[in-house]
Image (cartoon, grey):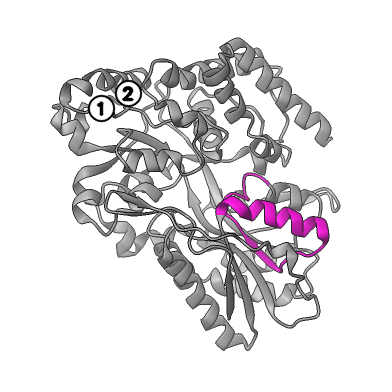
Amino acid sequence: MRRREFTQLSSWFLLGLGLTQCTNNPQSSTQQSISKDSDELSIWWQQGFYPEETDALAQIISDWEKESGIKVTLEIIPQKDILKEIESAIASGNTPDIFYAGVADLTIIPRLAWNNQLADVSEVIEPLEDLYSESVLAGVNYQNKAVNKRSYYAVPIMQSAIHIHYWQDLLTQMGHNKESIPKDWKGFWQFWEDVQAQLPKSGEPDIYSVGMPMSLSLDTYNNFEQFLEAYNVELLDENGKLNVDDPQVRQGIASAIENYASFYKNGTVPPEAVDWDNTGNNVALLSRTSLMTVNHTLSAPGSQRQDKDIYYNQLSTVKWPNKPSGDPMRFVVEIKQAVIFEASNHKENAKDFLSYLAQPENLGAYTEGAQGRYLPVMPQLFEKPFWQNPEDPHISVAVQQLQKTRPAYQVFNPAYGEVAAQNVWGTVMRKIAVDGLSIEEATEQAIKQIEQIFADWT
């Protein structure tokens, strides 16, 4: 296996509570042609947040190379570059055989499947179908307009819901324990607002109580999607039809926007949250400039796994409160998935590799290599000791949340991937915070943008 790393682990890494980052200038993959005549299998893979994740993948590839006799060229690409790289490769007709990116399921994979640019991978999925949960299978079942049917166009690798992390040791200093945190929606968020007022009196004047991104990061989009779910907003029906003409849906969007924006307006969110990238809320939490944050992976606690005191005693993960209606929360689940390009000259070899990767022992090793940042896609993998520790304050909560989920809207209609790609929710949130856009204006602007996206799609 040959590996050309575009940067030297440019994702942020955290040692204790110190933050370090190492970057080199990336060399664009599109500057080097992928030989379609080569017998080697070309794989582009998003850089892991931890070395163990990349190492686990490298070991799986090495084992497959020995078993198959086929060589692999692995390109490791940072999250911040990978979508730009693959879009350039698609435009130039220079795509790899296999592609994986943790942000692709929400943005480009539904479009690629719709446009018949991905290979059908049913022969990879179907022998393992009984090993996946129904929600996971739904998350890789896409519509292809060329053949006018749905099929499996991606292989599930890992999954995630959305989590709330906070510093329990700081709450303890203020006289609060985990049981102090209310379980109802209004009480839950009011608790953090009240804590904000207590922080200066407790000797922590530079900490904000809520690390909620208000920026153009995909984290803002993900967090707000969960707020829409909290307010029972059904933007799409199961047939993928847009419902924004429904007055209840429009009111629900407005309520969710008002609720989300209130954290910035009432001063519980750091002012710099308007400019955070996808790591900004993690960095704010782990540098203790925010007391709590909302994140769609377990990357924040996962980065502290080697420090047992921080991981088990200081950081904590709390269950989401019930919805404003009082109903239990349902979680928007994201399926992180690998695809094979239809243009590949090595589709059979690519399917063979993904079939090998998808074996429970290999998929389990890779998911654990990700330090629990994402969760397994096969229920039997949760039986492994890594996921079964009831004393783990993070994974135990995350596993519970997978009991009640729904797929992301992109599965029902690929046009919604453009809502994520254009970051409709992040755009209006930042305008509220920076430009003073009213809730009414933000609601109308978001709805009009979504309507235009769907109109352009059809």
Residue 200 lies left or right of residue 81; in this view the side is left
Neighbor class of circle 1 (other Cα within 10 Å; few <14, some 14-19, many 20+) is: some
Residue 384 x, y percent position in the rendering: 34, 64
Q: Quadrant of the C terminus?
A: top right
Give whichever of 268, 373 is nearer the camera.
268
Inspect the magenta stretch and tell me whether residue 90 lies in it: yes
**Residue 80 highlighted magenta (yes or no):** yes
- Circle 2 packing at 10 Å, graded few (<14), some (14-19), many (20+), is some
- Is there a contact, CB below 8 Å, between mark 1 and mark 2? yes
Q: What residue is rendered at 81% in x and 51% in y?
A: 115
Q: Quadrant location of the N terminus?
A: bottom right
The foreground one among 411 and 271 is 271
User: Residue 451 at x, y = what percent?
Assistant: 75, 25
The three-letter amino acid code for the residue at tag 1 is Ile
Q: Which residue is mark 2?
A: 188
- Disc 1 to disc 2, C-alpha distance: 6 Å
Q: Give the residue pinned by disc 1.
A: 181
**Which image quarter: residue 234?**
top right
Give the residues in magenta. Answer: 79-107
**Is residue 164 something one can see in this rendering?**
no
